[in-house]
Image (tube, grey):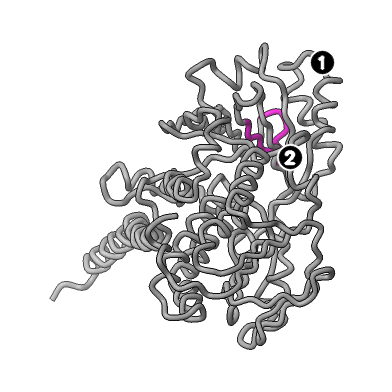
Amino acid sequence: MTKDIIGTKKKGCLVIIGSGPVGMVSALMLKDHFDKVVLLERQSQESFLQKHGFTFPIVFTPASIKILEGIGAWKPLMQEKSEYYGVVIHKRMMGKELEFTVAKEGVYAHWRNHIIAKLYQRILDEEMQIHFDTNVEDIDFQNNFCKEERLGNIPFNLLLGADGMHSFTRRLMAKAHPKFTEKAFSIQLLDKWHTYRLPSRGLLRQKFDGGNRHLASHIYLDNLARYPADKFRIISTSMRQPNEEINILIKHDAQLDSQRVKALNAEFFGSYVDSIQQLNEEWDAGCSGKFEHVQTPTFHLNSVLLVGDAAHGFQSSGDLINLGITSVGSFCKILNKSRSIPEALQNYDETVGDSLRFYASYALRRGEGKAINEMVMFVIARKLGIVGDHPSLHSNFEEDFEIQTSMARYKKDLLKVKLLFYGIPTILLSLVGLIFMIGFLPQS
């Protein structure tokens, strides 16, 4: 493990509810702080380690990679990778489809189930155990124990809620928190999605892969020309390992009928596959879900901390899992410098937590389609040398990315952009109006 968390006095028991990527990374990062680590996972071991069926592609940022290297997980992950050269954004403007390319070097995509399998092996290597098929019934925030159906009362010195968007830990925290109401902890439905995979061959490969020097993703924004009445967006990602495939994600309005979405998909991809039957079979083998946004006024209560999606879940553009991993890295550094766990949690929530909540507020505007003008203004202001990259334009891929520094810069840049596009024009118009009025004053 890194120097940040070696040589510290161990602090009893760490309990982690939820053993997804952020939960397992947390266990591997924090294990040297505690005498015992208990991971609780609601899924069966078979479902948790499922290697067949659907899975998601994930791209790690340099800051996340440093953490994965530190816990000994990056080298195993690189055994199965797909080069990710960047994104082609397709956007309709004035009736025409325009393409914008954002390229990146030295970046790779990985299937989620591959990530789960390699992180789980690291958990076993460190002689930790995940308890599968668990059912957490309650958390006592005052006396520091959680109650699990089979294991009974489990005492803890620190409990991390890494149990996803619909976090049970967050719901219990909302009920128990003395300062905030339950309504302050909310989850909002934005859109729905369906995702599936197709073999990368023929016309599909030519269109969405591009050969050895491919750009990994194509994003079709706004309503597509053939069906402008439907909110229907497409994101395709080219994957090379273990098989050459195109992962397809369809984002659509929550009110849009699933059969209509399937029909629209067939209209768009039908000409790129061998048959509509094959397309529909692959569609049916995929899975559906919801894009939601989590609202939390705080991430902690006493010795319990929400992390990852449970704390700041939002409609991701690849940034959500990376923020989850890097924020746990920030917590480790704060814990190492603190006199106690409660002090570390308070410090984390007031610094990193505030920055994450600010980022999530921007992500909500992005998910609702309200950040497009802001991004355009940032592009113009950046070309003028006034501001840095917008959060949506790969700012989290900076080598030294850290959420507090990034959000502090974003806040300052946002003020500059507003001054440039709103403040200065308003002042100039006011001056013109004043001069015009002076011109009509009676002369003495």
Q: Which mark is in front, 1 or 2?
A: 1
Crowd class of label 2 (few under 14; some 14 to 19; many from 20; radius 10 Å): some
Q: Is residue 444 above or below residue 371?
A: below
Where residue 275 is drawn, which disc sits there? 1
Crowd class of label 1 (few under 14; some 14 to 19; many from 20; radius 10 Å): few
Q: In what element is the residue under mark 1? A: loop
In which quadrant is the N terminus drawn?
Answer: bottom left
Q: Residue at x 42, y 32 (%)?
A: 106
Q: Is residue 75 above or below residue 275?
A: below
Residue 121 can be seen, yes or no: yes
Residue 50 screen position, x and y as percent: 76, 40
Q: Is residue 69 above or below residue 166?
A: above
Q: Residue at x 79, y 46 (%)?
A: 47
Residue 438 lies left or right of residue 133; in this view the side is: left
Q: Which residue is mark 2?
A: 230
Observer-nearest of 326 and 158: 158
Residue 216 screen position, x and y as percent: 54, 28
Q: Residue at x 47, y 19 (%)?
A: 213
Gap between marks 1 and 2 measured at Cα = 24 Å
Observer-nearest of 188 and 256: 188
Where residue 231 is drawn, which disc sits there? none
Residue 376 can be seen, yes or no: no
Point out the stretch of residues depicted in magenta.
225-236
Residue 135 lies left or right of residue 315; in this view the side is: right
Ranked by sequence position, the earlier of labels 1 and 2 is 2
Q: Is residue 7 above or below residue 100?
A: below
Are the residues at dot 1 and dot 2 in contact (C-beta closer than 8 Å)?
no
Quadrant position of residue 436: bottom left
Residue 404 screen position, x and y as percent: 40, 63
Q: Residue at x 34, y 62 (%)?
A: 412
Instruction: Give, as a three-letter code, the residue at label 2.
Output: Asp
